[in-house]
Each structure stands twice: as C-alpha cells, then as structure tokens.
Amino acid sequence: MPAKLLDSKGVKLENQRFTWKEMVGKPISKLDDDAFTRIRIILMNGIEIDALRLKHAIARFNGELRVPLAQIRRVEQHQATMINWLISADHSPLETTIAYEQVAIEVTAAVAQTEPDPYQAQTYRFGLLEDFDHLYRYSALLDRLEGKDANNILQSYTDIIPGRLTTNHHRAPEDDVRNPYNCRQAALITKIHAAMITAAEYQTHDYYMNIGPTFADPVARQLYAEIASVEEQHVTQYGALMDPGESYLEKWLIHEAMEVYNYYSCVEQETNPRIKAIWERFLDYELGHLTTVKGLFEQYERRDSAEVLGSSLPEFIEFKSQREFVRKVLTDEVNLRTRGTEFVDRSQESTASLEYRRHICSEGVAAEAVSAGYRWHEGGELNTKSDIKSKGETVYG
Amino acid sequence: MDKQTHLGMNRTGIQMSPLDSASLKTIAAEVSPDIGGSSDMAAKLRGKYIADANPIGSVPVPGNLKGLVGTAMEKLTGNDIEVLVDKLGERLAFERTGVRLYDALLAKTSVLEDVSEAMVQSLHRFREEELAHFELAKSILLDLGADPTAQTPCADVAGVASSGILKVITDPRTNLAQSLDALLAAELIDNAGWELLIKLAGHVNHAEWIEKFQLALKQEAQHLATVRLYVENEILRDSAVLG
C-alpha cells in the first residue's frame, strides 16, 4: 500500500468542500474513546495548523504561489476545524494539556525509534524526556488544583514519574539549535519526522500560550509560562533539524507528503469507525494537495518531485504505548544536557545555559513548587487512605 | 439523544487496562519525587500572589446622583452604596444568565419525547420570572442612580463561578437529568442571593425593597423546589430503567 500511495492522485482540490455542519460534528467521548484516538486528533490538528503556518510564511516571500497557497490553505483550515472540534467540551484546558503531553511523548518516542539518522534520533530522545517531565508536573497540577487523576486521560498508556527536571530545560538559545539533515542525502522519513514533530511542538507551544492566562491560579499561570517557554525552545530545536537549503516548494512538498504519511498512519490504526472515516477522507484530500504541489514543484523548479520524495512512503508510525522505550531512555539519558548543537553530560553543560537558568529561576520555579513531594497514585494522591482500608496494603508516602 | 445512563466502555479507570495499570502503579511507587517537600510549597507561592494581588475591579461610581436623594437613601452610610450596587449588579447579571440557562434547557426539552407538557410550561414560567427578577434588580439600581449596564466585581465573579453550569446545559450530549442538576446549582445560588439582598435591604431599612425582594425569593424558592423534584424524578426514573 505505501509503495503506491504517493502516486495516487487523491481528490481534486475543487472537490474538497465542507459545510459548517460537517466541520462541527459530534465530538469524541472523553470517557469512552481510546486515548490514542485523541492522540491522533491532537497530532493531526497540529499538523494542519502547521500546514497553514508554513504556507503563510511561503506566501510572504512569493507572489506567484499566493493563489495556490491560499486555495490549499482554505481546505486545510477546514480540515483543522473538523479535527480540532472533535475534542469534547468536558475536557478542561488542563486535561487537554495532559493529552497534549501524551501526544508529545508517545509520538516522539515512536519517531525516535524509527529515525535512521543517529543525531536526529538523539534529538528526539532528548526532547522526549523533557515532555515526559512536563506530563508529571502537569499531572501534579491537575491533581492538586482540580482534584483530578491524570490517568483518566492517559488510560495507563503513559507513565507519570519525573523525567529530566523542567528546571534543567531552561537553556540559552544557542544551546537549543541543532544540526540539520542534508536534504540531498536524508531519507524521506527523516524529513517527515522533522516536519511532523516541529508541527506538534509548535501547536503545544501555541496552546499553552493561549490557555495559560485563562487560569486563575498563580501556580498554574507560572507553570504554563514556564513550560510554554520550553516548548518554544523545542520548536527551535526541532525546526533546526530541517535543512535550511531546501527551497520553499521543497518544504511545501515535504509537508504535504508528511500529511499524507500521518493520515495514512491514522487510517491504518484508528479504532473509532466514525473518526476513521474522517482520516480516510482527509488522506484522499492530502493526496490531492500533494498532486497539486508536485505539479507546482515540477513547473517552477524543473525538477522531478521523486528527487525529494523517492518512490514510496515509509512504514506508518505506530500509535501505541512506548512505555519500555521511554523508561530505557530515561535511565540512560536523563543527565544529558547541551552545549551548542552537541549533547553532553550535565557536567559539561554550556556556561551560557547555566547562567541563563540561574537568573530565570532565581525567584522560584513553578515546576518544582507544583510537584514537591508529588507521587502519582491511582485516583489521585488523596486516594491513598482508601487503599489502606480496602486492601490492607502498605501505602508509600 | 440517549437520555438514560448506560453501561459501556468507559476507559478512564485503572481496571480497564490491568497490565498497563500494574506497570504504571509499580513504577510510580518505585520512583521517588525529585523535589522534596509537599503541596505547601505551591501554597506558599500562591500566598505571595494573594498578598500582592489587585482586586478584580471596582464598583462603578453612580452616574446619576438624583437617585441618591430621597428619604431611604439618606440612611445609607459607609460602604452601603458600594455593597448594594455590587450585589444588585451581581443579581442582575445572574438573573440575565438564568434566562439563558432556561432557554438552553428548553432547547433540549423541545427535542426530547417524554418530557411532560407541565414541565415545559413550568420551565417557561420560571424563565419569565428570571427575566422579571433581572428587571427588578435593574430598577433598584436605577433608583440608586447606578448604571445597570456596568459589570460590577461581584457580577463578574458570579459569572465565572456559574460558567460551568452554562457549559453543562448547553452541551448537546448532556441528558435532561444532568442538565437539571446543573440548573439546580444555579437555583440554590439564586435563592441564597435573594436572601442576602433582603438582609441588605433590611440593613438600610428599606421596606419597599424588602417586599419586592421577598416576592422574588418566594418565586425562586418555588423554582428550587420544582427543579429539585425534577432532578429526583429523572434520576429515579433512570435508576428504575437500569434496575
């Protein structure tokens, strides 16, 4: 199937139409749908929003492409709407945050294991441990602020324990920039990975920047401010993985192929039939976008799009719990830091980052305040007493 | 729309995935928190912000001092005016939102088959009474020379507090019992609100206001009793269906 997918023409752009009613359909059930259905929804919304972002950036620098860019953007805006509106209103912003971090962990872990470029894979493992830690801090906030158990969202797929302490994520900007792949040598999957993880992190950053100020609690406001800053660093990090030598059209082409790849992965693994039908429809739409962009690429650059895309799609990304991989990375790499583009032991971290951190954390760190002494327990940390009564177990404390 | 509660594939609890849950529980028990202390650390941070916080906002200065001239008004002292304007502004806002809550509930009952005509009529009547209470709060504010279009601090805070009620009732997925339960919370608050206004009117010894507020409270008490009964009936009916 993947081998021939890139040759499919998909649905013609003029036939990619929506009604408001279609876009605003029935949301998923927070309680009954599988967490991986929500993970796919959040990921695909992030990817569509990034599709808009990239195309707006291209349009700023290119007059000739503005009309086709606008045409495809219109469809992608409505795709994003139809996807993002699947999140039901009973998700509190903090519960949605837990889901966003689950996306970052499970998707980045899957990517890290299939990424063929060792440096890029290392970068994903590095970022993974930071999002893993964010999940723990936000879980503490959810429990201690709203009195809710993060595992109601995570459905036991993802561990809730400290990762690389968020305090240590605050680095000097020059220590967040990474080396890019070489567009002439890199595999298509490497290009796809960089584009999709950048998109996901960008979405997370923007989400935190939007909802952070909607919290009344000052600890929550500080925690969102702090982690939004780290997500901006992550956008810097992952964005830097992409080759700056790629042309606008080449980046556009890769983005469309990345969208095809992800919708295809969603189609293959979706368990909710109603949502699967959306993925199938949008896979066909994306193939239509890819066909259009292939034509533009060949028209303007006089190059065969196969030079960039190759002949087949890589194997789909696996949407499943990556618990064992994440634990191994945590054990092996929690003490990694950066110095410029290098990953180094914490003893060799750059002085610029140490100085940056010393100042920005000098009046306290919300990630530490919110999680002091916090240990996840099923049903919340207040639930430990009932265990003693019902099971006679010794409860840690 | 499925009105009844039903058993299904709720995936939120740990019993739904015993293997994954066991793994999660084990590692959470093994790995110690990396930051010592307790939730007191966050409480201290909150304390600093609380000590340094600005208020939500101010009560608007009455723009029309004509309202302040009168025998009853002469008895107002100290912060009486501010408190009255703030709490009347809150009642006004709450009653106005209350009308919208009933509108939202009526939209839901209009598509449900087994809702009695008597219930629909009562909900319509309560809606009209909420609107009348909004008008009552407005008229007293005008008597005080205050601007009834201003959002007072207590009106703002009450809106934040009741925002979840609106969210529950307007969600197409919530059933009648769930929606009525949310409405019950609104009516409980509303009753307490009018009781407080009666005490405030007594404090400034304004007999006419007391009389008007008592009538509003009487109607609100009926809303409360009726909505409470509706909730009980719906829950018991649901329970009977399940049993």
Image (tube, coloured by chain):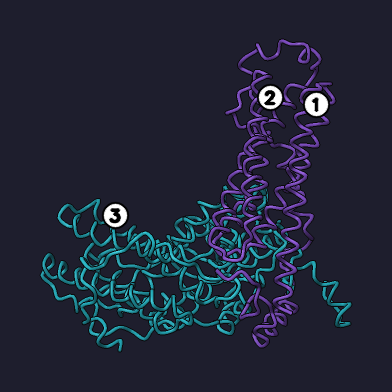
Crowd around label 1: few <14 · some 14–19 · many ≥20 (10 Å): some
**Nearest to the observer: residue B155 or residue B111:** B111
Q: Nearer the viewer, residue B36 or A260?
A: A260
Q: Position of residue B48 (x, y in %)?
A: 73, 42
In this image, A173 relative to A9: left or right?
right
**Residue B174: in sight, yes or no?**
yes
* Image point (18%, 75%), residue name: A305
Residue B196 against residue B174 in the figure, above or below: above
Task: Kindly identify which residue carries mark 1.
Answer: B201
Q: Is residue A262 visible?
A: no
Farthest residue, direction front: B117
**Is A245 on the left or on the right of B226, as rendered?**
left
Which of the numbered marks, if any, corresponds to residue A56?
Answer: 3
Circle 3: residue type = His
A103 lies left or right of B154: left
Q: CA distance from mark 1 to mark 2?
A: 11 Å
Disc 3 chain ID: A
Q: Judging from the image, what is the letter of the chain drawn in purple?
A: B
Pointer 3 and pointer 1 on the same chain: no
Please give the residue where the numbered disc 2 appears in the rendered image: B140
Q: Quadrant of the C terminus of chain B?
A: bottom right
Label 3 packing within 10 angstroms: few (<14), some (14-19), many (20+) = some
Q: Earlier in the sequence, mark 1 or mark 2?
A: 2
Q: Amino acid at mark 1?
A: Ala
Residue in the image at 72% along x and 70% along y: B237
Name the tint of chain A in the rendering. cyan
